Amino acid sequence: RNLAPRIAEGIGKLGFTVRTMDPRRPLEPAQGTAFVIDAEGWLLTAAHVVGTQREATVTLNGKRLIADVFKADAQVDLALLKLREAPPAGTTVLRFRALAQPAQLGEEVSTLGYPLSRLLGTSVRMSRGLLSATAGLRDDPRELQVSAEIQPGSSGGPLLDREGNVIGVVVKTLNPQAVARATGGALPQNVNFAVKAEPVLAFLRGADASLFQGLRYTPAGGLVGADRAVARVQAGDVVVEPDFFNDTATTEIYT
């Protein structure tokens, strides 16, 4: 009983700094990706990234900002954020592809985001692949299946066509362990999913009519500068992040 406080007190008397974590909260806050859709500071991400939090910590072009969760819809897995201050200088705004040009099977797609940022770092990462199917998991008509690689932290990032237009929002991948159990050992390879542009735009229309009217559409003019519209997002107001992996630990585990 009261073992942890007594241990913390004893270690503290030895001269070490001890930080006690709340056992009801995970050590690492939820983290994902968001992207700017309006110059006034509106960002789009996945709902599961922010969870039940009403605010989020956004790192955009090197600046830490706080955003309010304006609207979140767990069913479609989308969330709309609004920065409390203006975006940093140099921030760009992503354009959507016109609905008259729906995503096509086999076209080249790209993702931008912050996958595994605790290990890889806080630079934007890009992956490329093909649009594998115009339907998602169990033929969900609201989703796209893509072969572009995603990792934890990619959720909420934009799915872009070769011209840099948004055609979806990255939301999930197949769980390899679950698939292996269900199939007797088969492991999925690059089976990832994004919410289609149509439900994304419907979500934005319902969230704020004036924002929806101001959205930009094709042509985007390529991928140059698209990274300056992408932000790292963490649920809640994250003041200090725990450093789980120092260089030595990372080398020992992953090489």
Image (cartoon, rainbow, N blue to C red):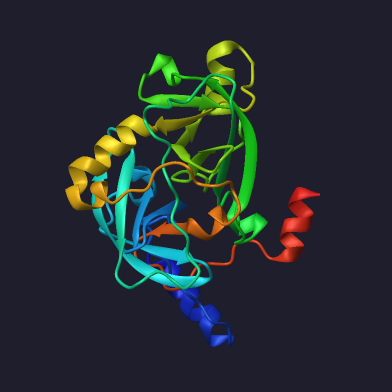
Picture quarter containing residue 132? top right
Given the current orientation, which residue lies at the most extreme top position?
Answer: 184
* Front residue of this view, candidates 120 and 5: 120
Looking at the image, which residue is at 45% across and 32% down?
A: 194
Q: Quadrant of the N terminus?
A: bottom left
- Residue 210 place in picture, x, y as percent: 20, 52
Numbered circles on residues, count: 0
In the image, residue 253 lies at what x, y percent? 74, 51
Identify the residue shown where x is 44% and y is 21%. Answer: 136
Residue 10 higher or lower than 27, as above or below: below
Residue shown at 81%/49% (left/top)? 255
Pick whichever, 64 or 24, lies toward us. 64
Q: Position of residue 121 (x, y in %)?
A: 64, 60
Q: Position of residue 254 (x, y in %)?
A: 75, 49
Tell me: 147 left or right of 136: right
Q: Would residue 245 be seen by someone viewing this image from the given angle? A: yes
